[in-house]
Image (tube, coloured by chain):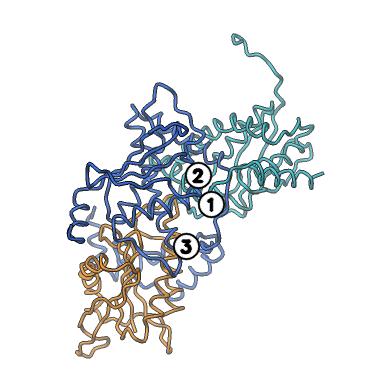
Amino acid sequence: MSYYLAIIGTTDSPIYECEFGTHKQGGDGTSKFSPEMKELNPFILHSSIDIVEDIQWQTNSMFLKSFDEFHGPGTGSTSTNVNYYISGFLTSGNVKFLMIHDNSVYKNEDSIKQFFMDLNDLYVKTLLNPFYKVNDVISSSVFDLKVKACAKKYL
Amino acid sequence: MSQPSDIIQVSNPTQTSTKSALKGGYNPSLGPIQLPTSYQAQLASTASSKRNIYDHSLSRRAPEVNLSSLSYIFNVMIQYSQKNSKGIQELEGKLNTLGYSIGPKVLELITLREGKNAKREIKLVEILQFIHTQVWRTLFGRVADELEKSSEADDEYMITDKQPLMSEFISVPKDMGQLNVNAFVAGIIEGILDVCYFQASVSAHTVETPGCPNRTVFFIKFDRDVIERENLRFHK
Amino acid sequence: MSKSLKTTGEDLWKNKADKVNSELFTLTYGSIVAQLVRDYKQDYTQVNLQLEKMGYDIGIRIIEEFLAKSQVGRCQSFKETSEILSKIAFKYFLNITPRVENFSTDGKQFSLILDENPLAEFVELPDDEKANKQLWYSNVLVGVLRGALEMVQLDVEVAFVGDVLRGDDATEIRLKLIKILKDEIPAGED
């Protein structure tokens, strides 16, 4: 199972991106997206922002489960297409955590939600730094490591 | 913003991945990169030995400091802003900017602390109530006094505070009578409203009443687009 | 003796201090430092200087409030000054008790070690190489101490020697007594 995560700021530009794979069931943590998918991922997420903008005015909740789908090339060299799902988390300050994942949401909804809650915690800590303004790129390597550690824990 | 070297980097990721492997963390011109696991382990061990902000817990109750310490720091902020300003408008503008950067931080912190019950505010009146109650209580220890809608215009609202905490020990000299240093708090409100996509301009005005010489009214004027969107959504 | 100072400090904090959320304090100070860094275009030496000057302006005023609220009498020695600073003054204003250490043998120098620093919660210095080597984020404290002690006739040189924000082991301020000022009327003033 592979995941592509992006944090999008209030002006729709990415402030953080990360790719990882699952550590469960013997996975080694590297994502298995095919090269075509790797190129498509940012575009897929960018188009899903439109859907987020629609949904965000209809619900109070922050966790947006599996709100978009993409049918695209699978992992490995086979030419079969698989379904990719996009889940998201919208903070009260309209910062979007969006993630493409390639397995059905039913198995993973809780762990994705937990992952987003931890990510929210990390994001707020970054935000509290006076030298960090909203929508700045998060280039801290410690943040990156912590995100990957969260991914290892939940996904 | 993109210089020739950036373009070369993006189109030759294999070349640059070796060059940039020396620095962890996200680089927007490169996108997500996967560093070799050995290097990741090395980074992890150096990171855990150094103090970092992510290890500090947010959920414990905030400690307190003396109000007069805050007042001294605020005073110094006003004096510094005044040095570089040519008038009251400019000074209030600078204070507003200083508060504006804090707004989103306060908002996210309060929402995070709500934990599982956290929700986003999607209605205009609700976000104003959130500010009037939650934000005021977190920052100042009590809720604001009044929240009113102007009867003359549908895009104007007012939050009133009879005894604003930050300006309690600040006395404005007579020749600057129009100045209200709560422009800083107005900036905080404006920062919160803007990131919630309820863009507005907020200003602080002193409106004395008998018994409340420091009574401050925060005048919130929403952008026309926001009001139209609210009306469309709720079929007014 | 030091135990009663500690309880005095705690009583003062509990009973005579109006309390406010420390996060508002941290964020307010943070936005000042961030603004200074922007205004001086990352010239961290200037930023340190400005913070120290701001602190000095605070210091010369804060001492009056402190003396009025705490009612402490004249200190008989620099050592006593250090104890009052750490157990009463810092407790009253910032709700922290820094440790007094490294007292020099001539009694004229000591360090204050801050285990917690409400000015610098959640702060991470900017990533350019200069900040880590040049910026003393909490430099306002240096000015406050210098200004306040000057008002009680102590000419003290104050400086940061370490900061956990910079990766040092501890946040440490060093105070050096230069001389005791006599009450002189400067020439030409009343």
Are the residues under badges 2 and 1 in a single subunit?
Answer: yes
Marks 2,1: beta carbons within 8 A? yes
Say which residue label 3 marks: B113
Residue C166, disc: 1
Residue C135, disc: 2
Chain letter tied to cyan: C
Q: Colour of chain B?
A: blue
Q: Chain of mark 3?
A: B
Quadrant showing the C terminus of chain C = top right
Quadrant showing the N terminus of chain C = top right
Say left or right for B183 vs C115: left
Task: Report the front residue among B124 and A133.
Answer: B124
Please, is residue C105 above or below residue B86 in the view? below
Asked which quadrant contains residue B208, the reply is top left
Work out which residue is located at the far top of the displayed protein and give it. C188
Q: Position of residue B4 (x, y in %)?
A: 22, 56
Q: Nearer the viewer, mark 1 or mark 3?
A: 3
